[in-house]
Amino acid sequence: MSMLPEVASGLLCGALFGYVLENAGFGSPVKLTAQFRLTDWSVFKVMFTAIVVAAAGLLALEELGVVAKDAMFVPPALLGAAAIGGALIGAGFAVGGYCPGTSMVGMVSGRLDALAFVVGLVIGTLVFALGFGIFGAWVNAGEFLDGDTLSEALNVSAWVVVAALAAAAIAGYAVAARFESGPVGPLGAEQAVAGAQPQIIVR
Amino acid sequence: MSTALVSSAGGRVRPFWPPWLAGIALGLVLLLTFLLVGHGLGASGGTTHLTAWLGSIVAPEATRANPYLGPMVREGNALSAWIVWQVLGLALGAFFAAWQAGRLRLQVDGERTVGRWRRIGLALIGGAAAGFGARIAGGCTSGLGLSGAATLGVSAFVFLVAFFAVGLVVSRLVRGVQ
């Protein structure tokens, strides 16, 4: 691929990604971490909806022959590495208020704590690189040999998996509605922009 | 410290999109990315290249010799990678959205609940844990969790379960931003 299309596709996809994340409210660490306090389920809803839409879209485009089967990158099933990384990023999210992508959104919307998180990302990457002799082996931890995708691992059609995910998403929205009707509801843009403020809604 | 910055919304703060709408939009952007480049969206790859680039300025010899960062530096400029352009685009797109909606504000978010320096310290520690974890997993919430799950990758679902489970527990142990 020549240089120009790579720059153009990167900037285009990134700009749309950032535009959607900010409009979802994902520059606010108060809103993001409210997912773990179970008072605002936006993180779950946005991620799960996007996964179902993109997964169904990719499958449909494969069926129509627009994209070749197996042409898309599927992450290798290194389940131990994924679990360690997921745990550390979940802990970092709860403590620091962001994940790597959302810290960029927070930073460009004027949050200096997000800038500190990005500096932390560089430090964490540096620690990994300096200790690569030890940590390098963790990267390949827990390889699962029965297939990289859920449909291979469970030996069912990919459409069955997508249907199950869609059903799980609908169930998740119902559970979310119960939690979000409590005394503290989802964080609105006004509160998010004003900074962390305990928000009690009297109904 | 909290200073509202210039916006096109005339002092008004526009509401966020409803989550279902943002989710559909994010899914379509992810689908477009797969069609254009054959893989999904990411973020931590950008800060990894940034780390390699900073290393090549501060300690060029050590960075070149490092088994992890070395290959990124030796192939030329460490910043010349698709993911770097995508993360730059992410920053531009998010800035435009915040500007358009009156949501730009210079602040240390969370200082009201935990104090300014404690908040900065927690963000640094959280960032370091996430930066290290993303290198072990080979991706973060975007690159492995979101993009991997769209291809039904088993490791993406393991990542997401670990992410939510540990996040739920740790947010009860540490009083962070809220």
Image: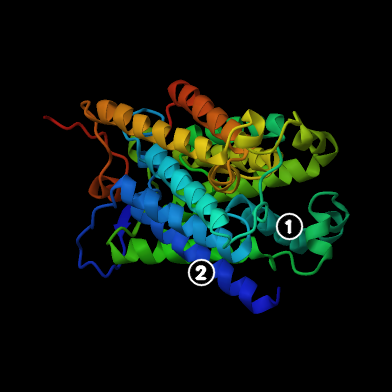
Viewer can see residue B51: yes
Chain at tag 2: A
Which residue lies at the image location 32% right of the left edge and 45% below the top edge? B19
User: Label 2 neighbourhood size at 10 Å, few (<14), some (14-19), many (20+)?
Assistant: many
Residue B40 screen position, x and y as percent: 58, 54
Please report the residue visible at 38 percent of the width from the left and 46 percent of the height from the top.
Answer: A28
Q: Chain of mark 1?
A: B
Mark nearest the camera among 2 and 1 is 2
Q: Nearer the viewer, residue A172 or B138?
A: A172
User: Looking at the picture, how far across and down is residue B42, in whole percent?
Assistant: 58, 53
Name the residue furthest front.
A64
In the image, taking residue A45 as reference, residue A61 lies left or right, namely: right
Amino acid type, mark 1: Ala
Q: Is residue A176 above or below residue B92?
A: above
Q: Are marks 2 and 1 on the same chain?
A: no
Q: Which mark is residue A12?
A: 2
Q: What percent of the width, then of the height, locates residue B150?
A: 54, 46
Task: Give the SS element for disc 2.
Answer: helix
Amino acid tagged 2 = Leu
Along the horizontal axis of the image, is B148 left or right of B81? Answer: left
At 55% from the left edge and 65% from the top edge, which residue is drawn? B88
Seen in the picture, residue A118 relative to A76 is either above or below; the reply is below
Count the numbered circles shown. Answer: 2
- Residues at discs 2 and 1 in contact (Cβ within 8 Å): no
C-alpha distance separating marks 2 and 1: 24 Å
Circle 1 is placed at which residue position?
Answer: B52
Q: Residue visible at 46% across and 59% down?
A: B29
